Image (cartoon, helix red, strand yellow):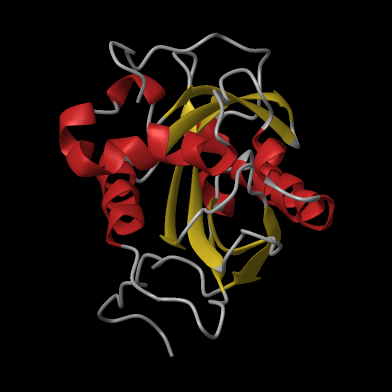
Amino acid sequence: MKDGAALTFIPRAPAPHCASEMSQMSDMTSIPHPDAPQEYPLVAKVCAHWASLRTRHALPARAALDPSELADALPHVFLAEFVTPRVARIRLCGHKVEEVMGMDLRGMPLTTLFGPNAREDIMSALEIVGHGARATLALQAERGFGQPEMCAQLALMPLCDANGRISHVLGVLERHGQIGRRPRRFATAKPAPVAMESAPMLRVISGGKA
């Protein structure tokens, strides 16, 4: 995060209530690029912290985030605010994310990091996050002169405001490969649906009829 930045946010217009969306929660995970490293420990760390704050009936509140729990992942973390169901503006951003573009990304839409062909995928992922799901996507950077191969993994997680409504996105972007000449954008964002998160098991009642 920027030096001295606190985990504070700007309120937004009401969005779907967290508790009412819990029944729709699912994950989207990536199809990794064939040549890309498939280990993203910092992404896993941030996702685990988010999951630890979630309860059976409510999503994590943005005020509950603990920077000390994220530690070495913080430079890769950003917080974005929904302005429409498919658009989120970055409010706080770690320097490892800003290195991709070589500029301060605060106030810019998340799609700034992506080329034209990937923006629809990102907006679709944000829409799903706004309904209470976590999304994980495999990214591949644009190639060109002075721009070597670079891949990344992006996770987007919903956060609630003080009124219990989904208002912000907790994001983490971990990359492999050299940035090279800036700015770099990601040309592809490939999400794929996977199995739903573990559901409660049905209890067998003794003496019930067959």
Does 96 appear above or below 5? Answer: below
Q: Position of residue 15 (x, y in %)?
A: 66, 24
Q: Position of residue 32 (x, y in %)?
A: 53, 76
Q: Residue furthest bottom?
A: 210
Does 158 appear above or below 28? Answer: above
Residue at 83 percent of width and 57 percent of height: 117
Residue at 29 percent of width and 24 percent of height: 64
Q: Nearer the viewer, residue 69 or 54?
A: 69
Does 156 appear above or below 162? Answer: below
Residue at 75 percent of width and 37 percent of height: 86
Task: Determine which quarter of the picture holds residue 167.
Answer: top right
Does 150 appear above or below 171? Answer: below
Q: Is residue 71 left or right of residue 197?
A: left
Q: Is residue 55 visible?
A: no
Q: Nearer the viewer, residue 184 or 180?
A: 180
Q: Is residue 72 visible?
A: yes
Residue at 36 percent of width and 55 percent of height: 43
Q: Position of residue 21 (x, y in %)?
A: 58, 41
Q: Quadrant of the N terminus?
A: top left
Count of labels shown?
0
Q: Quadrant of the C terminus?
A: bottom left
Q: Position of residue 13 (x, y in %)?
A: 68, 13
